[in-house]
Amino acid sequence: MSYPKPFSFDRLETYSLFDRPSKVGVDDLCKPPKPGMSVRDFLASLPNILAAGDVMEVATRWAKAVEGSRPVIFAMGAHVIKVGLTPLLIDLMDRGMVSAFALNGAGIIHDSELAMAGKTSEDVAAVLGSGKFGAAKETGEFLNSAISFAAQEGIGLGQAVGKRLLQEDFPYNDYSLLAQAARRDIPVTVHVAIGTDIIHIHPQADGAKIGNATHHDFKIFCSLVAGLQDGVYFNIGSAVLLPEVFLKALTAVRNLGHAVNRFTTVNLDFIRHYRPLTNVVNRPTLEGGKGFSLTGHHEIMLPLLAAAAMEQLN
């Protein structure tokens, strides 16, 4: 085959730039930040484009849900606690900006260690070789005792841990999400996969009690999801477990006749994963509402979102 002649653009049809619809205009551009500017002014200075525009829309939807007394649920991986955001989460409870929390099993570990000792997050690489990873005596004993307490009282794992933290009156309870949620009677559900958490290797671990407590919490979570119409659901830092739990809860409550088809979902994580995008952002909002995916570090993005929502509520 020989080379063809170069394609000619001589008769290409053109149109006027001034008549063409465009996605970006001068009104969307940023305003340079200035020293000493307020949070409100800083947020107003962001460009109304892509992620910056999504941040402000999520903040608006969050604020509207709060103003309308609609649910705002935070489903969180343990990293949100590990990066130092518990004081913010407690403040959001006090402001009425979060109505319930859902955690994975690691969440109660890091939260309880903070309450007991004022520190958490083991250096895994330094102790894994010796087989000492996850062997902290107090962590295993306290949390497995709390699980037994859940079985004794017929309550869920999140409520049981919160109550036991308060009963023990640990020195750093003021920094504990579970203790402060229990004090305020705000639901916290905990969703455990057996074998994923260090407390499962301790001699006090009881698989039947763990399973019963976390299944109790799943049913409470379903009740929370059943009332999510016009609310906001955040999945923060859980790549697999909590997105799967959410999808199963959503289908269960819809199956039983609950209208949950007009709400906002937000996934917030360091990178984009398949399950949060599919099970939180995209599939649940096919019947209505809107899903968002915001990529960034929790310790930056969550305070930024909270500040933006607070400004709209003031």
Image (cartoon, rainbow, N blue to C red):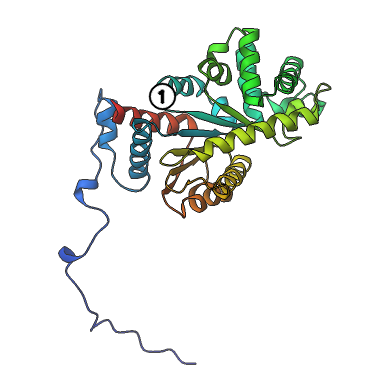
x, y percentage for residue 278? 54, 52
Please identify the quarter of the rendering in which residue 216 is found. Answer: top right
x, y percent for residue 285: 46, 51
Residue 296, compared with residue 98, is above or below; it is below
Residue 101 drawn above or below residue 166: below
Could you tell me the amino acid type at mark 1?
Answer: Gly
| Residue at the spot 23% in from the left edge and 38% down from the top edge | 31
Q: Residue placed at 36% from the left, 28% from the top?
A: 307
Above/below status of 17 relative to 139:
below
Q: Residue farthest to the right?
A: 203
For mark 1, does the 10 Å Cα neighbourhood hold few (<14), some (14 to 19), or many (20 or more) residues? few
Left or right, 211 with respect to 262, comes to right
Location of residue 151 by image quarter: top right
Where, quadrant-wise, is the C terminus in this rendering? top left
Which percent across, then down, holds residue 5? 36, 89
Element under label 1? loop
Residue at 19% x, 49% y: name it.
26
Q: Residue at x 61, y 21 (%)?
A: 111
Residue 237 picture location, percent across and down: 55, 37
Q: Is residue 121 visible?
A: no
Residue 251 seen in render: yes
Q: Is residue 96 left or right of residue 311?
A: right
Work out which residue is located at the far front of the displayed protein and give it: 257
Q: Left or right of 179: which side holds 59? A: left
Number of numbered discs on residues: 1
- The residue beneath circle 1 is 96
